[in-house]
Image (cartoon, rainbow, N blue to C red):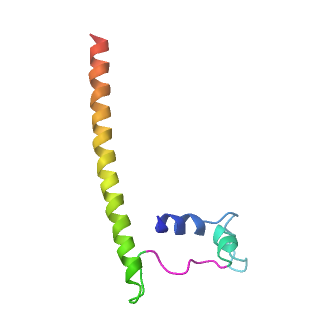
Amino acid sequence: MYEVEAILNSRPLTKVSDDLNDLQAFSPNHLLLLRTEPECSPGIFAKNDQLSQKRWRQVQYLSDVLEAVDKRIFALVTEAYEVVRASANC
């Protein structure tokens, strides 16, 4: 989720100019963090920050599990829809 937040908050809110003399495009990071870039890159941790690494792995694992469940549910719903559709065409 941190990666998504970082991507969304770094997207410009104003038109991006091609002119090198223009200022940087305004983004949500300017308002939220009072700077242009997030504190650290997503997925990069300090050596002494073991708790963040553990939480990150837990979140990634839960995300993978949820994605697998979503795929199974989608397959079941699609199959049920096709059965109902086939029986309606008979």
Q: Residue furthest top?
A: 90
Q: Give the main secondary structure of the magenta stretch.
A: loop
Q: Residue 10: which quarter of the image?
A: bottom right
Q: Work out which quarter of the rendered image holds the C terminus and state it.
A: top left
Query: Quick one: 5 or 15, which is closer to the camera?
Result: 5
Looking at the image, is 82 positioned above or below residue 27?
A: above
| Residue 9 is covered by the magenta coloring | no
Tell me: 49 left or right of 29.
left
| Count of marks, rendered view | 0
In the image: residue 73, left or right of residue 48: left
Place residue 9 in its image quadrant.
bottom right
Residue drawn at (39%, 79%), measured in percent from left and top?
Answer: 51
Bounds of the magenta segment: 35-42
Q: Is residue 39 magenta?
A: yes
- Identify the image quadrant of residue 32: bottom right
Q: Residue furthest front?
A: 51
- At x 65% / y 79%, what residue is drawn? 35
The x and y percentages for residue 49 are 41, 85
Q: Position of residue 77 (x, y in %)?
A: 32, 33
Q: What is the x, y in percent for residue 59?
A: 38, 65
